[in-house]
Image (cartoon, rainbow, N blue to C red):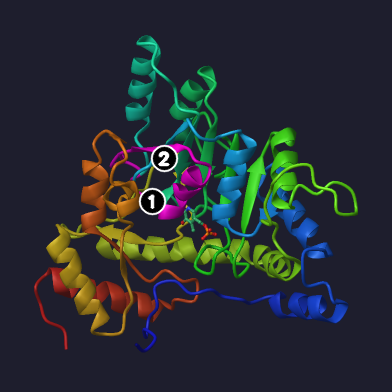
Amino acid sequence: MSAPRIPMLVPSLPGRARDYLVECVETNWVSSVGPFVGRFEREFAERTGAEHAVACASGTAALHLILLALGIGPGDEVLVSDLTFVASANPVRHCGAEVTLVDSETRTWNLDPALVLDELTRRRRSGGRLPAAIVAVDVLGQPADLAPLLSAATDMGIPVIEDAAEALGARWTAGALAGHHAGTPARAGFFSFNGNKIITTGGGGMVVTGDGHLAARVRHLSTQARVGPDFDHDEVAYNYRLVNVCAALGVAQLECLDDFLARKRAIAAAYDERFAAVEAVTPPPLVPGMERSGWLYTILLADRTMRDDVRAALAAHGIETRPLWTPLHLLRPYEGARVIGGGATAAALSARGLSLPSSVSLTDPELDEVADRILDRVRGRAVA
Ligand SMILES: *Cc1c(COP(=O)(O)O)cnc(C)c1O
Protein backbone atom coordinates (compact mmCIF):
# COMPACT_ATOMS: atom_id res chain seq x y z
CA MET A 1 0.00 0.00 0.00
CA SER A 2 1.45 3.38 -0.95
CA ALA A 3 1.56 6.28 1.53
CA PRO A 4 -1.42 8.63 1.28
CA ARG A 5 -0.83 11.88 -0.61
CA ILE A 6 -2.46 13.82 2.25
CA PRO A 7 -1.92 11.82 5.48
CA MET A 8 -4.22 12.18 8.48
CA LEU A 9 -1.62 12.80 11.19
CA VAL A 10 2.14 12.74 10.80
CA PRO A 11 4.80 14.12 13.14
CA SER A 12 6.79 17.32 12.49
CA LEU A 13 10.32 17.51 13.88
CA PRO A 14 11.52 21.08 13.41
CA GLY A 15 13.58 23.17 15.82
CA ARG A 16 16.39 21.61 17.82
CA ALA A 17 15.32 17.94 17.53
CA ARG A 18 18.35 17.03 15.44
CA ASP A 19 20.79 18.97 17.68
CA TYR A 20 19.53 17.34 20.87
CA LEU A 21 19.61 13.85 19.36
CA VAL A 22 23.17 14.43 18.15
CA GLU A 23 24.03 15.59 21.67
CA CYS A 24 22.75 12.25 23.06
CA VAL A 25 24.89 10.32 20.60
CA GLU A 26 28.00 12.43 21.17
CA THR A 27 27.74 12.30 24.97
CA ASN A 28 26.79 8.59 24.93
CA TRP A 29 23.71 9.35 27.09
CA VAL A 30 21.10 7.46 25.12
CA SER A 31 19.38 5.23 27.64
CA SER A 32 17.79 5.39 31.07
CA VAL A 33 20.26 7.91 32.49
CA GLY A 34 20.88 11.36 31.06
CA PRO A 35 20.07 15.04 31.49
CA PHE A 36 17.13 15.30 29.07
CA VAL A 37 14.73 13.20 31.17
CA GLY A 38 14.73 15.53 34.16
CA ARG A 39 14.79 18.59 31.91
CA PHE A 40 11.77 17.34 29.93
CA GLU A 41 9.86 16.72 33.18
CA ARG A 42 10.68 20.18 34.58
CA GLU A 43 9.82 22.03 31.38
CA PHE A 44 6.65 20.00 30.88
CA ALA A 45 5.49 20.72 34.44
CA GLU A 46 6.16 24.40 33.93
CA ARG A 47 4.30 24.49 30.61
CA THR A 48 1.20 22.74 31.99
CA GLY A 49 1.24 24.29 35.45
CA ALA A 50 1.51 20.82 37.02
CA GLU A 51 3.32 20.49 40.33
CA HIS A 52 4.92 17.14 39.47
CA ALA A 53 5.62 15.44 36.15
CA VAL A 54 7.04 11.94 35.70
CA ALA A 55 8.14 10.82 32.23
CA CYS A 56 7.14 7.28 31.20
CA ALA A 57 7.70 4.91 28.30
CA SER A 58 4.17 5.48 26.94
CA GLY A 59 0.78 6.94 27.79
CA THR A 60 -0.44 3.42 28.49
CA ALA A 61 2.41 2.89 30.98
CA ALA A 62 1.60 6.28 32.56
CA LEU A 63 -2.01 5.25 33.23
CA HIS A 64 -0.94 1.82 34.48
CA LEU A 65 1.44 3.45 36.97
CA ILE A 66 -1.20 5.93 38.20
CA LEU A 67 -3.65 3.09 38.83
CA LEU A 68 -1.00 1.04 40.65
CA ALA A 69 0.06 4.04 42.72
CA LEU A 70 -3.60 4.54 43.72
CA GLY A 71 -3.65 0.91 44.87
CA ILE A 72 -6.14 -0.29 42.22
CA GLY A 73 -6.19 -4.08 41.99
CA PRO A 74 -8.34 -7.21 41.78
CA GLY A 75 -11.84 -6.68 43.18
CA ASP A 76 -11.85 -2.98 42.26
CA GLU A 77 -14.08 -1.35 39.68
CA VAL A 78 -12.93 1.62 37.56
CA LEU A 79 -15.24 3.81 35.48
CA VAL A 80 -13.87 4.68 32.01
CA SER A 81 -15.24 6.77 29.11
CA ASP A 82 -16.80 4.48 26.49
CA LEU A 83 -15.78 6.56 23.44
CA THR A 84 -11.98 6.48 23.45
CA PHE A 85 -8.87 4.68 22.28
CA VAL A 86 -8.57 1.22 23.84
CA ALA A 87 -5.50 2.26 25.90
CA SER A 88 -7.76 4.30 28.24
CA ALA A 89 -9.13 1.01 29.62
CA ASN A 90 -6.45 -1.66 29.13
CA PRO A 91 -4.32 -0.64 32.15
CA VAL A 92 -7.35 -1.14 34.41
CA ARG A 93 -7.39 -4.76 33.29
CA HIS A 94 -3.58 -4.96 33.61
CA CYS A 95 -4.18 -4.23 37.31
CA GLY A 96 -6.73 -7.05 37.50
CA ALA A 97 -9.58 -4.58 38.11
CA GLU A 98 -12.94 -4.45 36.37
CA VAL A 99 -13.93 -1.81 33.76
CA THR A 100 -17.37 -0.16 33.79
CA LEU A 101 -17.93 2.17 30.84
CA VAL A 102 -19.72 5.52 30.76
CA ASP A 103 -21.66 6.77 27.73
CA SER A 104 -20.90 10.12 26.06
CA GLU A 105 -22.73 13.41 26.14
CA THR A 106 -23.23 15.12 22.77
CA ARG A 107 -21.94 18.47 24.08
CA THR A 108 -18.28 17.39 24.48
CA TRP A 109 -18.45 13.80 23.10
CA ASN A 110 -16.85 12.82 26.43
CA LEU A 111 -18.26 10.93 29.38
CA ASP A 112 -21.54 12.42 30.58
CA PRO A 113 -21.00 13.75 34.11
CA ALA A 114 -24.76 13.62 34.83
CA LEU A 115 -24.76 9.85 34.23
CA VAL A 116 -21.84 9.39 36.63
CA LEU A 117 -23.41 11.63 39.29
CA ASP A 118 -26.73 9.74 39.09
CA GLU A 119 -24.97 6.41 39.34
CA LEU A 120 -22.80 7.42 42.31
CA THR A 121 -25.73 8.99 44.16
CA ARG A 122 -27.91 5.94 43.60
CA ARG A 123 -25.20 3.57 44.76
CA ARG A 124 -24.41 5.58 47.84
CA ARG A 125 -28.09 5.79 48.80
CA SER A 126 -28.52 2.03 48.45
CA GLY A 127 -25.26 1.27 50.26
CA GLY A 128 -23.78 -0.14 47.04
CA ARG A 129 -20.08 -0.40 46.26
CA LEU A 130 -18.46 2.75 44.87
CA PRO A 131 -15.89 2.64 42.04
CA ALA A 132 -12.23 2.77 43.08
CA ALA A 133 -11.39 5.42 40.43
CA ILE A 134 -12.75 7.21 37.35
CA VAL A 135 -10.78 7.63 34.09
CA ALA A 136 -12.21 10.66 32.24
CA VAL A 137 -10.91 11.04 28.68
CA ASP A 138 -10.53 14.33 26.76
CA VAL A 139 -11.42 12.76 23.45
CA LEU A 140 -9.79 14.34 20.36
CA GLY A 141 -8.33 17.03 22.63
CA GLN A 142 -11.70 18.41 23.77
CA PRO A 143 -11.69 18.55 27.58
CA ALA A 144 -14.37 16.56 29.38
CA ASP A 145 -16.80 18.45 31.62
CA LEU A 146 -14.72 17.72 34.70
CA ALA A 147 -15.93 20.32 37.22
CA PRO A 148 -19.16 18.56 38.32
CA LEU A 149 -17.45 15.18 38.20
CA LEU A 150 -14.55 16.35 40.36
CA SER A 151 -16.71 17.91 43.05
CA ALA A 152 -18.93 14.82 43.39
CA ALA A 153 -16.06 12.32 43.22
CA THR A 154 -13.94 14.26 45.71
CA ASP A 155 -16.89 14.33 48.15
CA MET A 156 -17.10 10.56 47.92
CA GLY A 157 -13.33 9.99 48.07
CA ILE A 158 -13.09 8.62 44.53
CA PRO A 159 -9.91 9.66 42.66
CA VAL A 160 -10.40 11.00 39.13
CA ILE A 161 -7.71 10.41 36.49
CA GLU A 162 -7.77 12.63 33.41
CA ASP A 163 -6.68 10.91 30.19
CA ALA A 164 -5.30 13.98 28.45
CA ALA A 165 -3.30 11.90 25.94
CA GLU A 166 -4.81 13.92 23.07
CA ALA A 167 -5.28 17.18 24.95
CA LEU A 168 -1.85 18.77 25.44
CA GLY A 169 -2.47 22.52 25.21
CA ALA A 170 -6.21 22.37 25.93
CA ARG A 171 -7.46 24.47 28.86
CA TRP A 172 -10.45 25.74 30.73
CA THR A 173 -10.94 29.45 30.19
CA ALA A 174 -14.04 30.02 32.34
CA GLY A 175 -15.97 28.40 35.17
CA ALA A 176 -14.72 26.55 38.23
CA LEU A 177 -11.61 25.21 36.44
CA ALA A 178 -10.65 28.44 34.66
CA GLY A 179 -6.89 28.69 34.14
CA HIS A 180 -6.31 24.95 34.47
CA HIS A 181 -4.47 23.14 31.74
CA ALA A 182 -5.99 19.82 30.61
CA GLY A 183 -4.63 16.96 32.68
CA THR A 184 -4.05 19.03 35.82
CA PRO A 185 -7.26 19.59 37.84
CA ALA A 186 -7.86 15.96 38.77
CA ARG A 187 -5.93 13.79 41.25
CA ALA A 188 -3.65 12.78 38.37
CA GLY A 189 -3.56 13.16 34.61
CA PHE A 190 -1.46 11.79 31.82
CA PHE A 191 -0.33 12.58 28.27
CA SER A 192 0.97 10.51 25.35
CA PHE A 193 3.87 11.34 23.05
CA ASN A 194 3.17 8.64 20.52
CA GLY A 195 4.00 9.53 16.90
CA ASN A 196 0.58 10.96 16.08
CA LYS A 197 0.02 13.01 19.25
CA ILE A 198 0.46 16.80 19.60
CA ILE A 199 4.14 16.40 20.44
CA THR A 200 6.06 13.17 20.00
CA THR A 201 9.05 11.48 21.60
CA GLY A 202 8.74 8.54 19.21
CA GLY A 203 6.96 6.80 22.06
CA GLY A 204 6.43 8.16 25.53
CA GLY A 205 4.05 9.52 28.12
CA MET A 206 3.89 11.80 31.17
CA VAL A 207 2.10 11.57 34.49
CA VAL A 208 1.15 14.91 36.06
CA THR A 209 -0.17 15.38 39.57
CA GLY A 210 -0.28 17.80 42.47
CA ASP A 211 0.23 14.90 44.88
CA GLY A 212 3.92 14.51 45.71
CA HIS A 213 3.45 11.04 47.24
CA LEU A 214 1.68 9.81 44.12
CA ALA A 215 4.44 11.23 41.90
CA ALA A 216 7.15 9.57 43.99
CA ARG A 217 5.28 6.27 43.92
CA VAL A 218 4.86 6.45 40.11
CA ARG A 219 8.56 7.20 39.70
CA HIS A 220 9.55 4.32 41.99
CA LEU A 221 7.31 1.81 40.20
CA SER A 222 8.59 2.98 36.79
CA THR A 223 12.24 2.13 37.66
CA GLN A 224 11.94 -1.50 38.85
CA ALA A 225 11.40 -0.24 42.45
CA ARG A 226 15.11 0.22 42.75
CA VAL A 227 16.49 1.54 46.03
CA GLY A 228 20.03 2.85 46.21
CA PRO A 229 22.70 2.62 43.55
CA ASP A 230 23.11 -1.17 43.52
CA PHE A 231 20.76 -4.07 42.91
CA ASP A 232 18.34 -3.60 45.74
CA HIS A 233 14.62 -3.59 44.91
CA ASP A 234 11.86 -3.37 47.49
CA GLU A 235 8.93 -4.77 45.44
CA VAL A 236 7.93 -6.17 42.04
CA ALA A 237 7.74 -3.22 39.63
CA TYR A 238 8.18 -2.14 36.02
CA ASN A 239 10.65 -0.82 33.45
CA TYR A 240 8.43 2.09 32.41
CA ARG A 241 10.79 5.08 32.51
CA LEU A 242 11.30 7.29 29.43
CA VAL A 243 14.85 7.01 28.02
CA ASN A 244 17.16 9.97 27.38
CA VAL A 245 17.02 9.96 23.54
CA CYS A 246 13.23 10.08 23.66
CA ALA A 247 13.30 12.84 26.27
CA ALA A 248 15.72 14.81 24.05
CA LEU A 249 13.11 14.74 21.31
CA GLY A 250 10.49 15.74 23.90
CA VAL A 251 12.45 18.84 24.97
CA ALA A 252 12.80 19.92 21.33
CA GLN A 253 9.10 19.26 20.62
CA LEU A 254 8.01 21.20 23.71
CA GLU A 255 9.91 24.22 22.34
CA CYS A 256 7.63 23.98 19.27
CA LEU A 257 4.40 23.43 21.19
CA ASP A 258 3.04 26.96 20.87
CA ASP A 259 3.60 26.92 17.10
CA PHE A 260 2.03 23.46 16.82
CA LEU A 261 -1.03 24.51 18.82
CA ALA A 262 -1.44 27.69 16.80
CA ARG A 263 -1.40 25.65 13.57
CA LYS A 264 -3.72 22.93 14.96
CA ARG A 265 -6.23 25.56 16.04
CA ALA A 266 -5.96 27.43 12.73
CA ILE A 267 -6.65 24.15 10.91
CA ALA A 268 -9.67 23.46 13.12
CA ALA A 269 -10.97 27.00 12.65
CA ALA A 270 -10.53 26.79 8.87
CA TYR A 271 -12.41 23.48 8.68
CA ASP A 272 -15.11 24.90 11.00
CA GLU A 273 -15.56 27.80 8.63
CA ARG A 274 -15.76 25.57 5.55
CA PHE A 275 -18.41 23.35 7.19
CA ALA A 276 -20.43 26.08 8.91
CA ALA A 277 -24.03 26.14 7.66
CA VAL A 278 -23.56 22.87 5.75
CA GLU A 279 -26.43 20.76 6.97
CA ALA A 280 -24.87 17.40 6.08
CA VAL A 281 -21.71 18.03 8.11
CA THR A 282 -21.61 18.54 11.88
CA PRO A 283 -18.32 20.07 13.07
CA PRO A 284 -16.75 18.92 16.37
CA PRO A 285 -17.74 20.50 19.70
CA LEU A 286 -16.78 24.09 20.46
CA VAL A 287 -17.68 24.37 24.11
CA PRO A 288 -17.75 27.81 25.79
CA GLY A 289 -15.22 28.00 28.62
CA MET A 290 -13.02 25.25 27.17
CA GLU A 291 -10.22 25.68 24.66
CA ARG A 292 -9.57 22.51 22.64
CA SER A 293 -6.12 21.27 21.60
CA GLY A 294 -7.27 20.77 18.02
CA TRP A 295 -5.42 17.44 17.96
CA LEU A 296 -7.53 15.64 15.35
CA TYR A 297 -10.37 17.39 13.53
CA THR A 298 -13.40 15.09 13.37
CA ILE A 299 -16.77 15.70 11.72
CA LEU A 300 -20.09 13.88 11.99
CA LEU A 301 -21.92 12.88 8.81
CA ALA A 302 -25.57 11.83 8.54
CA ASP A 303 -24.94 8.14 9.23
CA ARG A 304 -22.44 5.33 8.81
CA THR A 305 -23.25 4.86 5.11
CA MET A 306 -22.55 8.51 4.32
CA ARG A 307 -19.42 8.44 6.48
CA ASP A 308 -18.06 5.37 4.69
CA ASP A 309 -18.97 6.85 1.31
CA VAL A 310 -17.12 10.12 2.02
CA ARG A 311 -14.16 8.19 3.38
CA ALA A 312 -13.93 6.08 0.20
CA ALA A 313 -14.29 9.16 -2.02
CA LEU A 314 -11.37 10.86 -0.21
CA ALA A 315 -9.25 7.69 -0.25
CA ALA A 316 -9.65 7.53 -4.04
CA HIS A 317 -7.79 10.86 -4.13
CA GLY A 318 -5.03 9.80 -1.73
CA ILE A 319 -6.56 11.56 1.28
CA GLU A 320 -6.30 9.58 4.49
CA THR A 321 -9.13 9.70 7.03
CA ARG A 322 -10.23 7.44 9.89
CA PRO A 323 -13.53 6.59 11.51
CA LEU A 324 -13.86 7.96 15.05
CA TRP A 325 -12.90 5.47 17.84
CA THR A 326 -15.08 2.38 18.17
CA PRO A 327 -16.76 2.58 21.60
CA LEU A 328 -15.06 0.17 23.95
CA HIS A 329 -18.29 -1.76 24.60
CA LEU A 330 -18.22 -2.84 20.93
CA LEU A 331 -14.64 -4.21 21.16
CA ARG A 332 -14.20 -7.92 22.03
CA PRO A 333 -12.19 -7.42 25.25
CA TYR A 334 -14.90 -5.12 26.67
CA GLU A 335 -18.13 -6.45 25.16
CA GLY A 336 -19.19 -7.87 28.52
CA ALA A 337 -18.60 -4.60 30.38
CA ARG A 338 -21.53 -2.70 31.83
CA VAL A 339 -22.17 0.68 30.17
CA ILE A 340 -23.67 3.37 32.38
CA GLY A 341 -26.13 5.18 30.11
CA GLY A 342 -26.25 2.28 27.64
CA GLY A 343 -23.64 3.44 25.11
CA ALA A 344 -26.04 4.47 22.33
CA THR A 345 -24.71 8.04 22.18
CA ALA A 346 -21.09 6.87 21.93
CA ALA A 347 -22.09 4.33 19.28
CA ALA A 348 -23.93 6.96 17.21
CA LEU A 349 -21.01 9.40 17.38
CA SER A 350 -18.64 6.62 16.37
CA ALA A 351 -20.78 5.48 13.43
CA ARG A 352 -21.05 9.02 12.05
CA GLY A 353 -17.56 10.32 12.94
CA LEU A 354 -14.78 10.87 10.40
CA SER A 355 -11.35 12.24 11.40
CA LEU A 356 -9.71 14.44 8.78
CA PRO A 357 -6.09 15.33 7.95
CA SER A 358 -4.90 17.52 10.85
CA SER A 359 -1.08 17.41 10.86
CA VAL A 360 0.65 20.68 11.66
CA SER A 361 2.35 20.25 8.27
CA LEU A 362 -1.02 20.25 6.43
CA THR A 363 -0.98 23.17 3.98
CA ASP A 364 -3.87 25.55 3.33
CA PRO A 365 -4.38 24.28 -0.27
CA GLU A 366 -4.44 20.70 1.05
CA LEU A 367 -7.02 21.64 3.67
CA ASP A 368 -9.14 23.36 1.03
CA GLU A 369 -8.96 20.31 -1.18
CA VAL A 370 -10.09 18.02 1.66
CA ALA A 371 -13.00 20.33 2.50
CA ASP A 372 -13.96 20.81 -1.19
CA ARG A 373 -14.06 17.08 -1.83
CA ILE A 374 -16.18 16.46 1.28
CA LEU A 375 -18.61 19.25 0.38
CA ASP A 376 -18.91 18.09 -3.21
CA ARG A 377 -19.56 14.54 -2.08
CA VAL A 378 -22.23 15.39 0.51
CA ARG A 379 -23.92 17.69 -1.98
CA GLY A 380 -24.03 14.79 -4.40
CA ARG A 381 -21.80 16.26 -7.08
CA ALA A 382 -19.05 14.20 -8.61
CA VAL A 383 -15.59 15.71 -8.69
CA ALA A 384 -13.13 14.80 -11.39
C1 LIG B 1 -2.68 7.60 22.54
C2 LIG B 1 -3.66 7.42 23.64
C3 LIG B 1 -3.36 6.69 24.80
C4 LIG B 1 -2.12 5.84 24.95
O1 LIG B 1 -0.93 6.44 24.75
P1 LIG B 1 0.34 5.60 24.20
O2 LIG B 1 1.46 6.55 24.35
O3 LIG B 1 0.04 5.25 22.76
O4 LIG B 1 0.49 4.38 25.04
C5 LIG B 1 -4.29 6.66 25.82
N1 LIG B 1 -5.45 7.29 25.72
C6 LIG B 1 -5.79 7.99 24.62
C7 LIG B 1 -7.11 8.69 24.60
C8 LIG B 1 -4.92 8.06 23.54
O5 LIG B 1 -5.28 8.73 22.43
**Residue 216 placement (x, y as % from top left):** 75, 40
Q: Classify 339 as above or below 383.
A: above
Disc 1 residue: CB within 8 Å of ligand 1: yes
Horizontally, residue 332 falls left or right of residue 196, namely left
Magenta segment boundaries in residue numbering: 83-109
Relative horizontal placement of residue 333, taking residue 57 as reference (left or right) = left
Instruction: Give how far apart the Cα atoms at labels 2 and 1 are.
Output: 9 Å
Q: How crowded is mark 1: few (under 14 residues within 10 Å), some or many (20 or more)?
A: many
Q: Decide if residue 266 is on the left or right side of residue 37.
A: left
Image mark for residue 80: 2
Q: How crowded is mark 2: few (under 14 residues within 10 Å), some or many (20 or more)?
A: many
Kindly give the residue lying farthest to the left in the view shown: 380
Q: Which amino acid does label 1 sit on?
A: Thr
Label 2: which secondary element:
strand
Describe residue 96's horizontal placement relative to residue 368 as left or right: right
Name the quarter where the C terminus is drawn. Answer: bottom left
Secondary structure beneath dot 1 equals: loop
Which mark is drawn over residue 84?
1
Horizontal and vertical percent position of residue 250: 68, 65
Is-magenta flag for residue 126?
no
**Residue 241's disc number:** none
| Residue at left offset 40%, top offset 61% | 268
Q: Which of 57 and 269 is in front in this view?
A: 57
The reply to whether callout 2 and callout 1 are in contact (CB within 8 Å) is: yes
Image position, residue 177 (x, y; %): 54, 33
Q: Residue 300, relative to residue 151: is it above or below? A: below
